[in-house]
Image (spheres, rainbow, N blue to C red):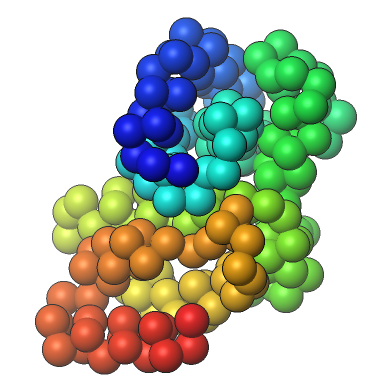
């Protein structure tokens, strides 16, 4: 979709997107979920994810009817994992904002982005988890929006847990990108180059290393 067309669709749906946003805020606030060091409302993170959808959505969005499901899944992507909603709860929430034809897509993206049960990051995000993302339209993109939002936050300063997580994301980058990339011609499964470059610029301080990392990524893309 052309950027101008996507932006116009977003503009036309501003009121509905804002209602989705407020409802997602309420869902996470109801379980007292916070972000960062616990000083930020979880909506801070949700807004960052939705902003990446706003900035890059035109690269993957196929039709106007898919715009609202993209924003809904951005705002509700952690609702099952962290806010105690079930899959059917997500569909019920979506029914307040989306048409019956849009609901399955939105719910499937949220479901695909829900971590598995596990004691470690590796167990929670194993092959089964990534397989679900690769097989769900738009899930690779929304997951990349989520990761890019977290990386941006972690690189916002060099203290405490943020710096530690920056190193985690740096070490995970190639595996993460390879795991969410289904390598399909269908644009709905695209892992946009622009977003990969943005992530690399955030986590890799050395320009030469960044170029080598990106070169390896493009070679295997």
Residue 74 in percent (x, y) is at 54, 37
Relative to 122, 217 lies left or right = left
Task: Report the number of discs.
Answer: 0
99 above or below 34? above
Residue 81 in percent (x, y) is at 69, 43
At horizontal 35% and vertical 60% (from top left) the residue drawn is 195
Relative to 157, 75 lies left or right = right
Q: Is residue 212 visible?
A: yes
At horizontal 38% and vertical 55% (from top left) the residue drawn is 148
12 above or below 76? above
At horizontal 17% and vertical 60% (from top left) the residue drawn is 158
Residue 56 in percent (x, y) is at 38, 46
Residue 147 in percent (x, y) is at 45, 56
Relative to 73, 167 lies left or right = left
The residue lying toward the viewer, choosing from 62 and 50, is: 62
At horizontal 29% and vertical 68% (from top left) the residue drawn is 197
The residue lying toward the viewer, choosing from 216 and 76, is: 216
């Amino acid at each position: 979709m052309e950027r101008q067309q996507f932006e116009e669709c977003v503009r036309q749906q501003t009121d509905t997107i804002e209602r989705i946003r407020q409802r997602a805020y309420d869902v996470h606030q109801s379980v007292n979920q916070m972000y960062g060091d616990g000083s930020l409302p979880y909506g801070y993170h949700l807004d960052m994810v939705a902003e990446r959808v706003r900035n890059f959505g035109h690269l993957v969005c196929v039709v106007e009817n898919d715009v609202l499901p993209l924003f809904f899944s951005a705002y509700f992507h952690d609702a099952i994992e962290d806010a105690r909603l079930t899959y059917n709860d997500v569909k019920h929430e979506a029914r307040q904002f989306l048409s019956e034809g849009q609901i399955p897509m939105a719910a499937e993206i949220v479901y695909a982005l829900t971590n598995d049960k596990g004691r470690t990051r590796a167990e929670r995000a194993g092959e089964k988890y990534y397989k679900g993302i690769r097989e769900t339209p738009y899930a690779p993109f929304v997951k990349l929006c989520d990761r890019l939002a977290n990386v941006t936050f972690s690189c916002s300063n060099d203290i405490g847990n943020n710096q530690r997580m920056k190193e985690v994301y740096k070490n995970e980058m190639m595996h993460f990108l390879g795991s969410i990339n289904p390598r399909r011609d269908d644009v709905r499964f695209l892992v946009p180059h622009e977003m990969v470059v943005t992530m690399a610029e955030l986590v890799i301080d050395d320009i030469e290393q960044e170029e080598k990392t990106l070169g390896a990524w493009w070679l295997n893309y």
